[in-house]
Amino acid sequence: MAADLLPFVLCIAGDRKEQVLAVPDADMSGKESNCNKKEAVMAKIRMTTPLVEMDGDEMTRILWQMIKEELILPYIDLKTEYYDLGLEHRNETNDQVTVDSANATLKYGVAVKCATITPNAARMTEYNLKEMWKSPNGTIRAILDGTVFRAPILVKGIVPYVSNWKKPITIARHAYGDVYKNTEIRVPGPGKAELVFTGEDGTQIRETVHEFTGEGILQGIHNTKKSIESFARACFNYAVDTKQDLWFSTKDTISKKYDHTFKDIFQEIYDTEYKAKFEELGITYFYTLIDDAVARVIRSEGGFIWACKNYDGDVMSDMVATAYGDLSMMSSVLVSPSGVYEYEAAHGTVQRHYYKHLKGEETSTNSIATIYAWTGALRKRGELDGIPELVEYADKMEKACVKTIEDGKMTKSLSLISTCENPVILNSLEFIQAIRATFEEL
Ligand code: NAP
Ligand code: MG
């Protein structure tokens, strides 16, 4: 589906592109769009504040257009401020577009992001890049100072590998510091390793890490009070928002200063800022050691948020996603402590499917996570702007997604993990159109 089929007006406002998606109904009767009569007479839902739209790469960029044309533009008078984070445009703008899109998110409060390529050596050649640009998600996270919440999308017929899991487990991963911003030394031979902090006034704190008698390895990691506080508030706010219990776990018995500080900061913020609200909502905050948490999570029936330090969250989110079925059935949102939201799919750009698509071959790529990124963002916009129709639209579209799969219509990867007896396997566009048909019937 060519991008130029999409009728929109592009206005350049300063260095920003304001995309006003005013789609005349008459223009939507083309063969790609298949507007039916019902929709022609239905008024589109109006928006007051634009969403920050971050377009992306490869197969997910293709799905992005399909989703807009089939599932959004027919129903919503979509207002977005458009940023093209496709790798070519990031390269053209020296990655300035990524920074601009994050700043726009701070301004408007809600963004929806398509999956993007994080360049590596192969991409440098493929896209003839000026530089190996950083991960857009990393750049955006650093500007928004956020915490990433990932939750599985549950449907009947896709049964979690852990049989007692009945409700979603949302992983909240601290996205700053620890081993992801480390300093390492390969110790060449005998010698003394020390940890030294020099204050601004020159005062030093010094600890011996180890007296090496031979070769070894050494690592320095850090975190900041500010970032841990932001993480804690994002988790407490999300628990209040979604009315779920919050669990938090570290290894504070072993790491009596580092991990213990995480535990203390969470407890203090909970006691002073959130305890009353939690009690009012009937939800709980529960701290336990990471190994105890792992055991309890497996035995639980789900239905809570599990806040994890950066590394624990990295590892546990892949375990939880796989145990629930599939990365393409995970929703993901970055929440900043100031209440800014960025919705995206948890998976990547599905490169292998894109190459098939480029060769003109049929693809069967699951668009659910990308659709949920849109519905999540539109729902939040509706809540913030007091537009209940937008919230209802998002709820109904998500219901249509679930029902379509439960009715046996799905993409190939889902059919492989579904217990549905005779699934109808659809291609990428057909699946989105099937969701639209279900939506029309609801
Ligand atoms: P990926 O795009 O998530 O895909 C890995 C494999 O998972 C696919 O080849 C496919 O398996 C399956 N898959 C993932 N999403 C699917 C979907 N929606 N429907 C059906 N199958 C799906 O990860 P990757 O191939 O490692 O990375 C590709 C690019 O994405 C990289 O350039 C990476 O930098 C980027 N990436 C971006 C983000 C982000 O923006 N959030 C996250 C991760 C990766 P089969 O091929 O077996 O069908
Ligand atoms: Mg990981």
Image (cartoon, rainbow, N blue to C red):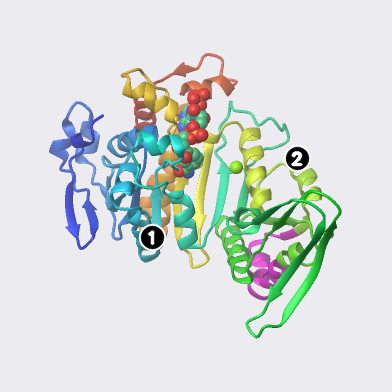
Q: Residue at x 57, y 58 (%)?
A: 238
Q: Main secondary structure of the magenta part?
A: helix
Do tag 1 and tag 2 residues touch (Cβ < 8 Å)?
no
Residue 153 image offset from top left, x and y in percent: 54, 38
Q: Few, some or many C-alpha atoms within 10 Å of disc 1 (few <14, some 14-19, many ≥20)?
A: many
- The answer, for residue 375, to whether it is visible in the render is yes
Residue 123 image offset from top left, x and y in percent: 41, 37
Residue 143 image offset from top left, x and y in percent: 45, 62
Q: Quadrant of ligand 2?
A: top right
Judge whether residue 227 is colored magenta: no
For residue 177, side relative to residue 268 (left or right): left
Q: Residue at x 24, y 37 (%)?
A: 39
What residue is pinned by disc 1? 105
Residue at the far top in the pictured view: 422
Q: Quadrant of the C terminus?
A: top left
Residue at the far bottom in the pictured view: 201
Q: Is residue 342 above or below residue 234?
A: above
For residue 106, which quarter of the picture?
bottom left
- The answer, for residue 398, to whether it is visible in the render is no
Q: Is residue 282 above or below residue 162?
A: below
What residue is pinned by disc 2? 298
Start-end of magenta stretch: 265-286
Q: Residue at x 73, y 35 (%)?
A: 164
Residue type at mark 1? Thr
SS label for mark 2: helix
Q: Is residue 55 above or below residue 138?
A: above
